Image (tube, rainbow, N blue to C red):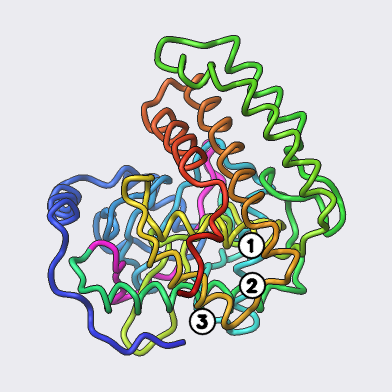
């Protein structure tokens, strides 16, 4: 589906303020580092690197004006492995090879590579996509929100169709080892992380620790039941939501950031998209948004009866695992971001046991 409308006019106040701050902020990558990395591509920097529209995101990303045009230079976080980057790049190269126009384009070095390593850091270069916008940053009328979310649901279905028979190279620890194998991070891995969290409980995580036995019991039961269902696997995006979509006039939706793309249950990606498009917490969930997304996806690529039956299990499975993982990351790094996410997933788990009750067409 093509977006044929105009860019909305009025930015939400929070994003307007963030844009003004990022406009004045300096890019994280130095001129020296940027020059050295671009040299691997045979490109020259024409002006100082700048923050891209919307800021850096989770990784250090800068907008660079080169003699080969505008590009985005990305420095990956240290936690992202070489194998995971190789998996992301194999997917992007496959999509580029079949002329799938809804994904970013990698730039290759003079040696035909897509990853540059310098001083222990990993970099990649992407073509800059001109004129795009992210709809959720704007004040919209209800019918505009519906149109954007409908396009988003259709775009994910199209991506799943396109990648249905493609198996990427590399590995991502969040997914399966193969079309029939186990997960890289299996049940034992999550239970070990949960045990570490309980042993390191603080006053900030006391409410989580009180639920530890419940979370363990739920995860054991869900893992066993879902393993028996033999749900269809495909190469999924892994972080599909409004924050990773770019809209351009008279063009397909562009899907950004394939950093955690992986081989996984396709229905799990649909379930995760429901709460991302519905809202960030129980208090903000908008049922209509979830419906619009689900029915747009299902109209192009219908879920099987087994996948539909698995929706409540996948909802709980996702939020239990995410709660444990964010709790663990907080205990390790003591950052408020992961702590708030752990409590958010616990809140969503408590709020809704079966999303199908919200997806009724009535």
**Looking at the image, is 298 positioned above or below residue 274?**
below
Cα separation, mark 1 vs mark 3, equals 17 Å
Counting from the top left corner in percent of width and height, residue 15 is at: 19, 55
As for residue 218 lying within the magenta part, the answer is no
Q: What residue lies at 70% left-to-right and 28% top-to-bottom?
A: 217
Q: Mark 1 points at which residue?
A: 236
Asked whether residue 125 appears in the rendered view, the answer is no
Which of the two marks, 2 or 3, is nearer to us in this view?
A: 2
- Label 1: state its secondary structure: strand
Q: Residue 87: x and y, percent?
A: 67, 56
Which stretch appears magenta?
A: 117-137
Q: Quadrant of residue 339?
A: top left
Closer to the camera, 44 or 310?
310
Q: Earlier in the sequence, mark 2 or mark 1?
A: 2
Q: Name the residue under label 3.
A: 101
**Residue found farthest to the front:** 362
Picture disc at residue 345: none
- Rendered residue at 44%/83% (across/down): 252
Q: Quickly name the residue at label 2.
A: 160
Task: Look at the numbered discs 2 and 1 and tell me whether their residues touch, using CB distance below 8 Å.
Answer: yes
Say if 134 sits above or below 181 in the image. below
Would you say 162 lies left or right of 109 here?
right
In three-dimensional space, the C-alpha distance between marks 2 and 3, rounded to whole angstroms, equals 14 Å
In the rendered image, residue 274, in percent from the top left (x then y), is placed at 49, 59
């Amino acid at each position: 589906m093509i977006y044929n409308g105009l860019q909305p006019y009025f930015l939400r106040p929070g994003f307007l303020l963030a844009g003004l701050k990022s406009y004045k902020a300096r890019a994280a990558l130095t001129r020296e580092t940027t020059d050295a990395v671009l040299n691997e591509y045979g490109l020259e920097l024409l002006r100082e690197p700048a923050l891209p529209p919307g800021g850096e995101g989770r990784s250090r990303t800068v907008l660079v004006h080169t003699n080969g045009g505008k590009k985005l230079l990305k420095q990956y976080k240290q936690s992202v492995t070489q194998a995971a980057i190789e998996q992301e790049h194999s997917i992007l190269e496959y999509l580029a090879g079949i002329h799938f126009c809804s994904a970013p384009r990698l730039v290759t070095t003079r040696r035909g590579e897509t990853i540059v390593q310098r001083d222990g850091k990993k970099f990649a270069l992407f073509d800059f996509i001109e004129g795009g916008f992210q709809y959720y940053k704007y004040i919209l009328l209800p019918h505009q929100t519906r149109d954007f979310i409908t396009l988003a649901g259709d775009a994910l279905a199209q991506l799943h169709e396109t990648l249905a028979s493609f198996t990427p190279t590399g590995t991502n620890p969040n997914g399966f080892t193969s079309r029939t194998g186990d997960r890289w991070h299996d049940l034992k891995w999550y239970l070990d992380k949960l045990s570490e969290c309980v042993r390191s409980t603080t006053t900030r995580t006391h409410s989580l620790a009180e639920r530890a036995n419940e979370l363990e019991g739920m995860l054991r039961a869900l893992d066993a039941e879902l393993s028996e269902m033999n749900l269809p696997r495909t190469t999924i995006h892994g972080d599909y939501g409004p924050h990773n979509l770019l809209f351009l006039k008279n063009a397909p939706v562009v899907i950004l950031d394939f950093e955690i793309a992986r081989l996984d249950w396709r229905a799990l990606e649909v379930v995760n998209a429901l709460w991302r498009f519905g809202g960030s917490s129980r208090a903000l969930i908008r049922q209509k948004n979830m419906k619009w997304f689900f029915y747009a996806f299902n109209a192009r690529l219908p879920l099987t009866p087994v996948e539909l039956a698995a929706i409540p299990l996948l909802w709980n499975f996702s939020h239990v695992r995410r709660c444990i993982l964010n709790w663990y990351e907080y205990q390790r790094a003591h950052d408020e971001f992961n702590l708030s996410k752990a409590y958010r997933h616990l809140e969503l788990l408590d709020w809704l046991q079966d999303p199908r009750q919200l997806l009724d067409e009535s």
